[in-house]
Amino acid sequence: KGTWTILGIESSCDDTSAALLRCAPGGARPAPLAEVTADQQAAHAAFGGVVPEIAARAHAEKLDTCVAGAVAQAGLTFADLDGIAVTAGPGLIGGVIAGVMCAKGLAAGTGLPLVGVNHLAGHALSPQLSDDVPFPYLVLLVSGGHCQFLIVHGPDRFTRLGGTIDDAPGEAFDKVARLLGLPQPGGPAVEAAARDGDPTRFAFPRPLTDRAGCDMSFSGLKTAVLRARDALVAEQGGLWRADRADLCAGFQAAMRDVLATKARRALEACAARGVDVRAFAVAGGVAANRAIRAALQEAAAGTGCAFAAPPLRYCTDNATMIAYAGSFRLMKGDRDGMDLGARPRWPL
Ligand code: KG4
Ligand code: ZN
């Protein structure tokens, strides 16, 4: 078969997404045909975080319209599709179940082959949607729920070099925003506030950078911001705009330094393992941060490695990356049965 038109379905966190992607065996860059995503930010806003039960219900309500919308947007019908790829974990289990059930229903009704996709594989492969990133490459997955360095040897082979032992960076950005009375999602708000801040006013820690390996820790950094805030409030009765800017700038600089230091270690670790990675890519929502992107790019340049930061629509949760990650198995003729399960945890 020359080309495959694949329906991707994603519902593992707070975005319901369906996409159509046209793929060809043999490594040609796939062509995105359509994507319809319904975010749930408004539904969770009052709770200051994603509420799993609300997320699951919203996915169940929106999946059908996202799928129908993506098929219509591409100007196609179900008869034009060649396969279905659905996130089968890891993630908030109610949402994953909703997506898997939707995909199974479609597969049963149309007779199309179905594969379950690991959400992390979707993120890890997403740089290939927009950039020339040949295997093997190094990827830093850095989002609200994840933080890890992976060597991507091929579409189904990954080596985890290290990751966070506590919070994910996006989670830390969100918590810092909450501490300072800034809106959610916290990342963009903290980045904006940091722009006119002094990153040197507060001496925030760079956890684990003095230790070998690629593991990271961010909960101490978040606590340091909390302490600095409380000290200021106790001293002056509140926070000034400049205080907020300096706290954000100091926090962001610490985050940037930790990620850049560990990226250098990860690139060294690839060489030490004899894996000749020619590209370093970032994926996940935090990759939107300009200061962090620039520091990671510099780390790559230091080792003569190409750097890829995909456009934001592929960095954040999306069904196009799920269609892409599933395309490899579908095009080989692999498929999952109606016993495909939803997995809350699923390490790569
Ligand atoms: O990948 P993503 O959309 O969702 C998952 O976590 O799976 O990432 C969302 C996270 C949020 O925590 C958000 O605050 C963070 O990415 N984020 C940023 C920026 N934009 C989004 N963090 C730092 N700087 C940004 N500009
Ligand atoms: Zn994700």
Image (tube, rainbow, N blue to C red):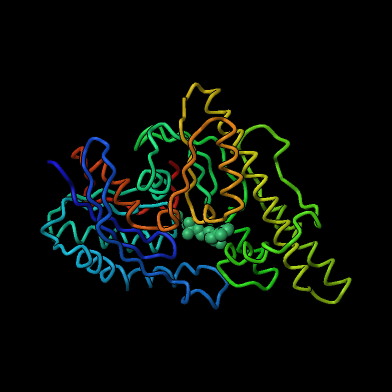
| Horizontal side of residue 232 vs 112, given as left or right | right
Q: Residue furthest right?
A: 235
Q: Where does residue 66 sit, x and y in percent of width and height?
A: 28, 68
- The quadrant in which residue 198 appears is bottom right
Residue drawn where x is 77% and y is 52% of the image: 204
Of 181 and 33, which appears nearest the observer? 33
**Residue 3 versus residue 65 in the image, above or below:** above
Q: Where does residue 252 sit, x and y in percent of width and height?
A: 67, 55
Q: Where does residue 234 sit, x and y in percent of width and height?
A: 86, 71
Quarter containing the C terminus: top left
Q: Where does residue 34 sit, x and y in percent of width and height?
A: 26, 61
Residue drawn where x is 80% and y is 56% of the image: 202
Of 85 and 35, which appears nearest the observer? 35
Quarter containing the N terminus: top left
Question: How many badges with numbers are in the image?
Answer: 0
Residue drawn where x is 74% and y is 60% of the image: 225
